[in-house]
Image (cartoon, rainbow, N blue to C red):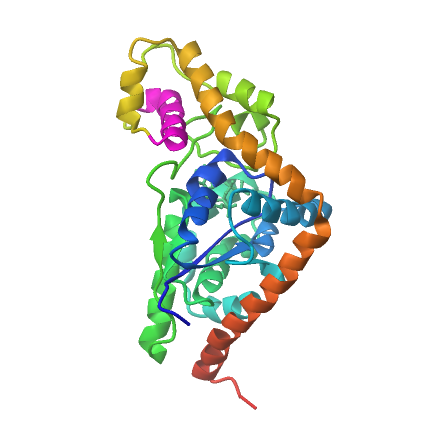
Amino acid sequence: MDDKKIIFSGVQPSGNLTLGNYLGAIRNWAKLQKDYHCIYAMMDMHTITVRQTPADIRRRTLEVLALYIACGIDPEENILFVQSHNPNHAELAWVLNCYTYMGEMQRMTQFKDKSARHADNINTGLFTYPVLMAADILLYGADYVPVGKDQMQHIEICRDIAGRFNAIYGDVFKIPEGLLSKSGAKIMSLQEPTKKMSKSDENPKAYISMMDDMNVVAKKIKSAVTDSEGVIEYRPDDESKAGINNLISIMSAVTGKTPEEIAGDYASAGYGTFKADVAEAVVEVLAPIRAEYDRLIADKAYLKDICASGAQRARAISQRTLNKVYKKVGFLQL
Ligand code: AQP
């Protein structure tokens, strides 16, 4: 093995991927593949922390893989696999559960949000989701985990769990670092811009799906909630400007200009003109990805082959970590 560092990340096939998933995560993964050994998974085990339709998870798992590739991730250079195809994730998660405190999990923002949204199904899987996520990362000795801002708290807890384990048993786990993208790290809902854009939002107008037709993408941006002030200024700390701040952030992420430059460009423009230009810029980025996705998703056999070889490679790497952990905690080795 050369001295390239290791990257691990993944997306849950819990809905159609959004512009937030793309700008906050996947787009950066493609950029990292030249300089790192990258392992990217379809995190199907995480999806069942919330009730799902089984056929949808199955279908979306291949859709997510096709999107990864359509976004420029090379399936030969990187390891792409389905989380549930590698049982080591569940096995390490169990061990780590025994080194994680209830109080730590109770503090997790995502647990609080999701248990409020799914009050009829506050299951222990939802509670211990960050422990499974810690196992996902630690199994591969990942140096960096590129994520959106919403997941940084889970990276912190992963570091705490790994550090605690190492303090007892010696240097078993590499302590990973979260990697935030420079722009697009938190794209907000188009309808409630103080909330993050989520693929499982009940209101489809709140998110831009990577599966939306381009005219739908444009329509959603044009009907994004803004304010009545009529001024295009970037004021990230002013909640009343959350809608305009979000559109500026999206424009910044797709054009590479800074939010201040964009606000300057549109200082004398109306919201209608600005929204039309944001829509055009987003469509310009998404349309070629969508065309490539349509081509890839037609070839299920190719996608399944990638899953099979990815799982084999992922198992080989992660087995070494799991063996070490089992030995350290005292499980009999034959
Ligand atoms: N709105 C967002 N802005 C920037 N980054 C985002 N990510 C998610 N939403 C945004 C990043 O995408 C990666 C994959 O996320 P995930 O699918 O594992 O789960 P999530 O963070 O819970 O995303 P969703 O869309 O909100 O899913 P649901 O609705 O199923 O809970 C992560 O790196 C995340 O930070």
Q: Please state the total of marks drawn on the protein image.
A: 0
Taken as a whole, is the magenta stretch helix, strand or loop?
helix
234 sits left or right of 328 in the view? left
Q: Quadrant of residue 163?
A: bottom left
What residue sits 34% from the left and 70% below the top? 164
Q: Horizontal and vertical percent for residue 256?
A: 35, 32
Q: Quadrant of residue 239?
A: top left
Q: Is residue 210 visible?
A: no
Q: Quarter of the image containing the C terminus?
A: bottom right
Choose between 98 and 138: the one closer to the eye. 138
Q: Is residue 274 above or below residue 22?
A: above
Q: Quarter of the image containing the N terminus?
A: bottom left
Q: Horizontal and vertical percent for residue 47?
A: 59, 50
Choose between 334 and 129: the one closer to the eye. 334
Choose between 308 and 236: the one closer to the eye. 308
Q: Which residues are magenta?
A: 238-256
What residue sits 44% from the left and 49% below the top? 29
Q: Horizontal and vertical percent for residue 312?
A: 60, 68
What residue sits 41% from the left and 47% below the top? 31
Q: Is residue 39 above or below residue 217?
A: below
Q: Is residue 221 above or below residue 102?
A: above
What residue sits 44% from the left and 38% below the top? 23
Q: Is residue 310 magenta?
A: no
Choose between 172 and 129: the one closer to the eye. 172
Q: Horizontal and vertical percent for residue 12?
A: 56, 48
Q: Is residue 314 visible?
A: yes
Q: Is residue 252 magenta?
A: yes
